[in-house]
Image (cartoon, grey):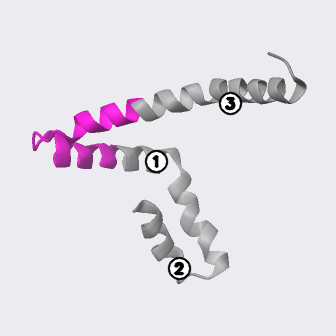
């Protein structure tokens, strides 16, 4: 959603105008305020309404995180297995 908003804002601009429009968005102050606004919106949408969604977010987020952490090890294992199969080991 945020990318769509940025795209719609810069869609009608000339190329020379885009850096001056985007540069303030990359400052630490802007990022902090945007992050805080996101947390406030999340709090009002899910936490204050006693929704079960935050629990789902934590569970699925944990599953995705653990998958991403284990992925390099799995890839190494599969590459080793493929290499052994090609060279007749094990």
What is the x, y in percent for residue 6?
Answer: 48, 67
Q: Residue 43 lies in magenta, yes or no?
A: yes
Whichever of callouts 2 and 1 sits on the residue coming sooner in the sequence is 2
Q: Secondary structure at mark 1?
A: helix
Q: Is residue 35 left or right of residue 90?
A: left
Asked whether, in this view, residue 60 is left or right of residue 87, the answer is left
**Which numbered circle lies on residue 88?**
none
Lower sequence index among marks 3 and 2: 2
Reading the image, the residue beneath label 1 is 31
Say which residue appears at 81% left-offset and 27% top-offset. 85
88 w.r.t. 9: above or below:
above
Q: Nearer the viewer, mark 2 or mark 1?
A: 2
**CB atoms at circles 3 and 1 under 8 Å apart?**
no
Q: Residue at x 60, y 72 (%)?
A: 18
Q: Give, as a single range, the part of the protein colored magenta.
A: 36-62
Q: Closer to the observer: label 3 or label 2? A: 3
Question: What's the distance in space between the residues labelled 3 and 2, CA to CA?
Answer: 40 Å
User: Where 55 falls versus 12 (above or below)?
Assistant: above
Q: CA distance from mark 2 to mark 1?
A: 22 Å
Between marks 3 and 1, how big is the CA–CA gap?
A: 34 Å
Nearer the observer: mark 3 or 1; the answer is 3
Q: Which mark is residue 11?
A: 2
Dominant secondary structure of the magenta stretch? Answer: helix
Q: Which residue is mark 3?
A: 75
Q: Residue at x 86, y 30 (%)?
A: 86
Q: Secondary structure at mark 3?
A: helix
Mark 1: give few (<14), some (14-19) or many (20+) Cα within 10 Å: few
Q: Verify CB contact (< 8 Å) between mark 2 and mark 1.
A: no
Up the image or down, 21 lies above or below 25; here it is below
Q: Work out which quarter of the rendered image holds the N terminus and state it.
A: bottom left
> Horizontally, is 20 left or right of 90 in the view?
left
């Amino acid at each position: 959603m945020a990318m769509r908003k940025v795209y719609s804002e810069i869609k009608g601009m000339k190329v020379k105008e885009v850096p001056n429009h985007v540069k303030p968005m990359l400052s630490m102050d802007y990022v902090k305020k945007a992050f805080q606004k996101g947390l406030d919106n999340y709090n009002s949408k899910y936490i204050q309404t006693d929704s079960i969604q935050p629990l789902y977010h934590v569970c699925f987020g944990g599953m995705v995180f653990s998958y991403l952490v284990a992925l390099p090890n799995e890839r190494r294992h599969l590459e080793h297995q493929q290499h052994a199969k090609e060279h007749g080991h094990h």
